[in-house]
Image (cartoon, rainbow, N blue to C red):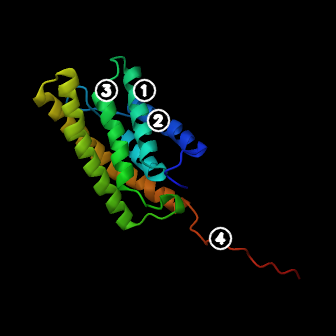
Amino acid sequence: MSKSKFSVKTIVAIGIGAALFFVMARYLSIPSPIPNTTFGIQYSVAAFMTVLYGPVAGMLIAFIGHMLNDMAAGWGVWWSWVIASGVFGVLMGLGVRGMKLDEGEFGVKDAIRFNVVQIVAHCICWGLVAPVLDILIYNEPVEKIFLQGLVGGLGNILATAIVGTILCFAYAKAKPKKGSLTKEDSTEE
C-alpha cells in the first residue's frame, strides 16, 4: 500500500484509529500525581497505525482522537496538547517510513528503530511543542507545564515501548509473508 495516497482504506483507518485513541484516552487512562496529566496507551495504537498508514494518517488519528477526548472531558479543547499529538503522528510517520509491517516484516532492528523514533517524537512533543504552546497560547506557568510534559512524555514513551512494540510484532506475525502460500499438488488415487 502506498503511504502517500489517501485511499478509502486509509480514511477508514483514520476514523477507527481516532475512535480507538479517544476511547483509550477517555476510559483506559490512569491519573498521574501531576494535575491534568494521565497515563494511557492511546499513543501506542497511534504509533502502530502510523507505521501502517503513514504520517498524515498518524497526525489525523492523534489530533482527532485527542480533540474528541478533550471535548468529552468537559474542560474544552486544550489546543496546545492536541497540536502536540498531531505533531507526534507526523514525526512518528516520517521516522518509520519504509518499514514493511504491512508485509509482515518487523524484526529486532525494526523494533529498535520504532522505539528510537517514538522516544524522540515524544520528547519533542511533550518536552517542547506542548509546553511552549501552553506558554504562548494559555500563558501557563513554566514550571508546571514542563513538569506535566515530562511526566506525560515519560508515561507515553513507556506505554508506546511496551504496547506499541507488542502490537507491531503481533501484527507482523499474523501477516502471511510474501511467497509463503503455495499451491499444494493434489493427486487423486
Q: Are marks 2 and 1 in contact (CB under 8 Å)?
A: yes
Q: Residue 95, position in %: x, y?
A: 34, 54
Q: Nearer the viewer, mark 4 or mark 3?
A: 3
Question: On the image, numbered disc 1 is attached to which residue?
Answer: 68
In 3D space, how far apart are the residues under numbered discs 1 and 4 (Cα atoms)? 42 Å
Q: Are marks 2 and 3 in contact (CB under 8 Å)?
A: no
Question: On the image, numbered disc 2 is attached to which residue?
Answer: 18
Q: Residue at x 58, y 69 (%)?
A: 178
Label 1: element kind: helix
In 3D space, how far apart are the residues under numbered discs 2 and 4 (Cα atoms)? 34 Å
Q: Residue 179, position in %: x, y?
A: 61, 72
User: Mark 2 or 1 closer to N-term?
Assistant: 2
Viewer-side residue, 75 vs 52? 52
**Left or right, 160 with reference to 124:** right
Q: Which mark is residue 79?
A: 3
Label 3: element kind: helix
Q: Is residue 175 above or below residue 76?
A: below
Question: On the image, numbered disc 4 is attached to which residue?
Answer: 181
**Left or right, 37 with reference to 53:** left
In 3D space, how far apart are the residues under numbered discs 4 and 3 (Cα atoms)? 48 Å
Label 4: element kind: loop
